[in-house]
Amino acid sequence: DVPGIAFDIDGVFKAGRFFFPDGLKALALCHNAGIPFVFVSNGGGGLGEQAYLDGFKKKLIDAAPEDDRVQYAGTLDHITSESMILSYTPMGEDESLKDKRILLVGDPREKVKEIATNYGWTKAVHVSDYCISNPSVDPFAGNDKNIVSSVANPPAPPPAGSSIGDANGVTVAHAHAHAAEDKSDNFDTVVVMTDPHDWFEALQGSVDAVVSADPNCSEVMEFDISRNVPVHFSNPDIFWKAAHPQPRFGQGAFRLAFETLLRSRLSLLKAPPALIDMVLRGSVVQWGKPSLQTLACAERRLNHLGNMANKETSLSGIWMVGDNPASDMAFSALGGSKWRGCLVRTGVFVDSDAQCGAAMVCDNVSDAVAQILATAREESK
């Protein structure tokens, strides 16, 4: 029996665009010991799993010392996209989303829309494109946004000369805010795939979608208590390790802003406090670390990778190697007794922080792998 390892990426292998020099060595140690591993990130940047993995491998090799590149670079060849679990990867396995009319939130816009297409979300409409075709939704938007098709699988282009006007009467190209067969403003769900760059636009569009099936109506609006529009968030991290010396706000901060503004909007519609609490509890669906959906995805893939390497091998347990006690160690705890956590000092965590149940603390990712292998050898005696 061998352990499996789930690695975080930001704060473990890199900080922002800067990759740590020992990442290649850490994965080579796993490969040489026959340890199956996956990457479980609360990021992704709108890239597909294979594209993210290809760039990740190259940057690991580029950051490594020359001797490590010569010795270990070939050990990355066996890693496939099955090992890469980005924040939104488990969403793509959810069949229930494929027939939903989705308000899609996240940037870069075109990359996020491409992911939606790859996941089979044929009715996904990006919030930026929705606001282009409904200019009054965002009163602060400029007129210089790049206007392209807004649905993941766009319908045929409009007839020549077709156009719409913005709030100032300026003619802009048709934005295809809706699929040809569905002209309504009614969304079944909202999916926050990545961090949006324009919070105002994303927050206004998301709150509107939850509150009403016709948010652009000119009549006095009343909240429909039977309305249920889930809002899926791919990443719960309030803070994350970027290039800045101090932690930066993540998608978890955006969720807090959304919940606060939804509460205020429902209060303005005179919804009673108990109803508002119920709507907030029912509308938010959290993915990423820590969530049961992402945990199940990681376990399933680790077991499969272990069986592919050796059909007689079973996992003796799973280690979560991360830098964030609030997400990585909570994720490990969610897995129960078969999971253990290891914190590294290259990201958010500092020694004065609560360790949140971590079984060990290491200086960096290669040290973490070495300590996990030593522990496995000792426990197998």
Image: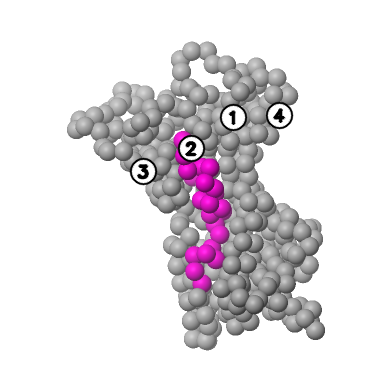
Give amino acid for label 4.
Answer: Asp
Image coords of residue 307 (percent x, y): 60, 72
From this viewpoint, is residue 283 visible?
yes
Q: Is residue 270 above or below residue 379?
A: above
How far apart are the alpha carbons under marks 2 and 4? 25 Å
For disc 1, the marked residue is 228
- The reply to whether discs 4 and 3 touch (Cβ–Cβ < 8 Å) is no
How far apart are the alpha carbons under marks 1 and 3? 25 Å
Q: Is the C terminus in the top left, top right, bottom left or bottom right quadrant? A: bottom right
Could you classify mark 4 by the number of other residues whose Cα lies within 10 Å: few (under 14), some (14-19), or many (20 or more)?
A: few
Observer-side mark, 2 or 4, equals 2
How far apart are the alpha carbons under marks 4 and 3? 36 Å
How far apart are the alpha carbons under marks 1 and 2? 13 Å
For disc 4, the marked residue is 277
Residue at the spot x=46%, y=35% of the render?
Answer: 101
The one of 230 and 94 positioned closer to us in this rendering = 94
Observer-side mark, 4 or 3, equals 3
Residue at the spot x=38%, y=40% of the render?
Answer: 151
Give amino acid for label 2.
Answer: Lys
In the image, the segment drawn in magenta is: 79-106
Image coords of residue 189 (percent x, y): 53, 36
Check residue 48 for magenta coloring: no
For disc 3, the marked residue is 153
Query: If you read the primary sequence from the N terminus, does the residue marked by circle 2 or circle 4 appear first?
Result: 2
Query: If you read the primary sequence from the N terminus, does the residue marked by circle 4 or circle 3 appear first?
Result: 3
The one of 64 and 142 positioned closer to us in this rendering = 64
Residue at the spot x=39%, y=36% of the render?
Answer: 129
Query: If you read the primary sequence from the N terminus, does the residue marked by circle 4 or circle 1 appear first?
Result: 1
For disc 2, the marked residue is 100
* Residue 373 sits in quarter: bottom right
